[in-house]
Image (cartoon, rainbow, N blue to C red):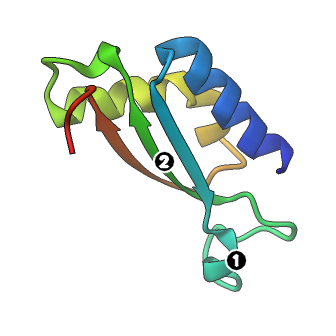
Amino acid sequence: MGAIFEAIHNKLTAAFEPTRLEIEDESARHAGHAGSRPGGESHFNVLIEAAAFAGKPKVVRQRLVYQALSEELKGPIHALSVKALAPGEA
């Protein structure tokens, strides 16, 4: 995995101690489109499950993830899809 993938993994793990974390680099599907970079690592899907999200609305959960990845979202990440769940949610 690349440096941006590792940064996403490390920052989300440190911030939320997730019970589940899936990160998918979808950059290859966006080659030639806006925000695409040579070498990829520009478009990601994240599924994260953590107790920190319990009782919080979806938009608050997403904002927390965006805050944890604020540096990456300023540059190398062009698009980030987030599904943030509390334990036991589907």
Question: What element does badge 2 sit on?
Answer: strand
Sequence-wise, the earlier of marks 1 and 2 is 1
Mark 1 closeness class: few <14, some 14–19, many ≥20 residues within 10 Å: some
Amino acid type for the residue under numbered disc 1:
Ala
Mark 2 closeness class: few <14, some 14–19, many ≥20 residues within 10 Å: some
Between marks 1 and 2, how big is the CA–CA gap? 16 Å
Tell me residue 68's x, y (percent).
53, 22
Number of marks: 2
Q: Which mark is residue 28?
A: 1
Give the image quarter of residue 42. Answer: bottom right
Tell me residue 35's x, y (percent).
64, 67
Give the image quarter of residue 55. Answer: top left
- When the figure is inspected, residue 57 is found, relative to residue 78, above or below; the finding is above
Question: What element does badge 1 sit on?
Answer: helix
Quadrant where the C terminus sits is: top left
Q: Is residue 35 left or right of residue 15?
A: right
Determine the residue positioned at 45% across, 25% down: 19
Determine the residue positioned at 34% across, 29% down: 63
Amino acid type for the residue under numbered disc 2:
Val
Determine the residue positioned at 67% across, 69% down: 27
Tell me residue 54's x, y (percent).
20, 18
Q: Which mark is residue 46?
A: 2
Q: Is residue 77 left or right of residue 3?
A: left
